[in-house]
Image: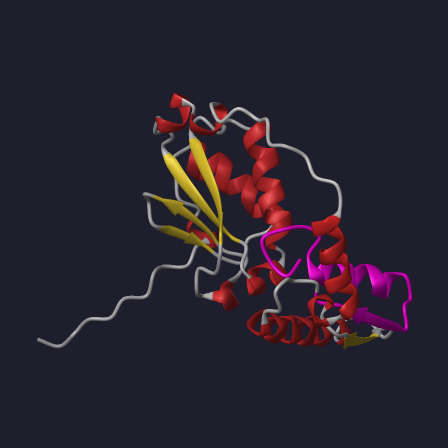
């Protein structure tokens, strides 16, 4: 996955390097083809390669193959699925529109975890996992904290980014250790971890 999911492209490339692969072929599988996403794949691989070359010598060559949606085999697979067996929908819609989904929770904080392409390359998947584990075992839980994984929050070079609302606190370069402090000190204790956050930049117009 490039963003919003596991395993991330960077994690898989790290595994390939660890396994001493000489060459890695990345095949885009999105349907329909998304040229914007393919551009991001190029950038993400270039970023990974630069970081890898700075820390290791056995960096594989990474190539990008033809997207799966561009192949005749994909068309044949879709045709086979259309002509294959199917089933009648028998599920009840009641749980989909249950009254419980109309209740706004009593959480005190809304935590946004950026899962955009750049933050994912900086390690946001592990940050999101660490936050989930800490909220299960820590001094506060999901009754107090609503967590939302988001798309790009814009200041990508500062990632991974975690934003705590309504306090408008932007934690940057977050890792698992930082998550522990954010949960214990900020979400539970009410004290902003100043050394982990970056103030919002402001501009003032001349009168």
Out of 172 and 83, give the one closest to the viewer.
83
Which x, y percent locates residue 113?
50, 49
- Write down the quadrant of residue 121 in the picture: bottom right
Colour logic? secondary structure
Position above or below: 19 against 168? below
Residue 105 in view in this figure:
no
Out of 91 and 177, give the one closest to the viewer.
91
Q: Which residue is depicted at the point 75% across and 46% down?
A: 84
- Write down the quadrant of residue 17 in the picture: bottom right
Q: Which residue is depicted at the point 85% across and 75% down?
A: 57
Position above or below: 43 against 189? below
- Write down the quadrant of residue 179 in the picture: top right
Residue 29 in view in this figure:
yes
The C terminus lies in which quarter of the figure? bottom left
Out of 124 and 24, give the one closest to the viewer.
24
Q: Residue furthest front?
A: 83
Classify residue 60 as left or right of residue 33.
Answer: right
Magenta-colored stretch includes residue 149: no
Q: Residue furthest left?
A: 207
The N terminus lies in which quarter of the figure? bottom right
Q: What's drawn in magenta, residue-wise?
A: 1-28
Classify residue 40 as left or right of residue 82.
Answer: left
Which x, y percent locates residue 151?
49, 57
Classify residue 18 as left or right of residue 51.
Answer: right
Total residue callouts: 0
Q: Which residue is depicted at the point 40% across and 28% down?
A: 101
Which x, y percent locates residue 195?
46, 53
Which x, y percent locates residue 123?
63, 56
Magenta-colored stretch includes residue 24: yes
Q: Which residue is depicted at the point 75% across and 68% down?
A: 27
């Amino acid at each position: 996955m490039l963003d919003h999911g596991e395993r991330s492209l960077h994690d898989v490339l790290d595994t390939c390097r660890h396994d001493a692969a000489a060459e890695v072929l990345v095949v885009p599988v999105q349907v329909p083809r998304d040229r914007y996403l393919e551009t991001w794949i190029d950038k993400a691989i270039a970023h990974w390669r630069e970081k890898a070359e700075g820390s290791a010598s056995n960096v594989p060559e990474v190539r990008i193959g033809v997207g799966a949606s561009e192949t005749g085999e994909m068309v044949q697979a879709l045709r086979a699925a259309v002509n294959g067996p199917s089933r009648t929908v028998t599920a009840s819609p009641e749980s989909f529109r249950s009254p419980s989904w109309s209740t706004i929770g009593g959480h005190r904080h809304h935590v946004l975890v950026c899962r955009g392409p750049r933050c994912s390359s900086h390690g946001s998947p592990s940050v999101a996992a660490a936050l989930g584990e800490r909220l299960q075992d820590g001094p506060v839980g999901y009754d107090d904290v609503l967590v939302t994984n988001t798309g790009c929050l814009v200041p990508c070079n500062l990632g991974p980014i975690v934003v705590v609302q309504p306090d408008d606190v932007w934690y940057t370069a977050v890792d698992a250790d930082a998550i522990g402090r954010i949960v214990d000190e900020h979400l539970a204790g009410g004290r902003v971890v100043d050394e982990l956050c970056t103030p919002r930049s402001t501009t003032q117009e001349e009168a």
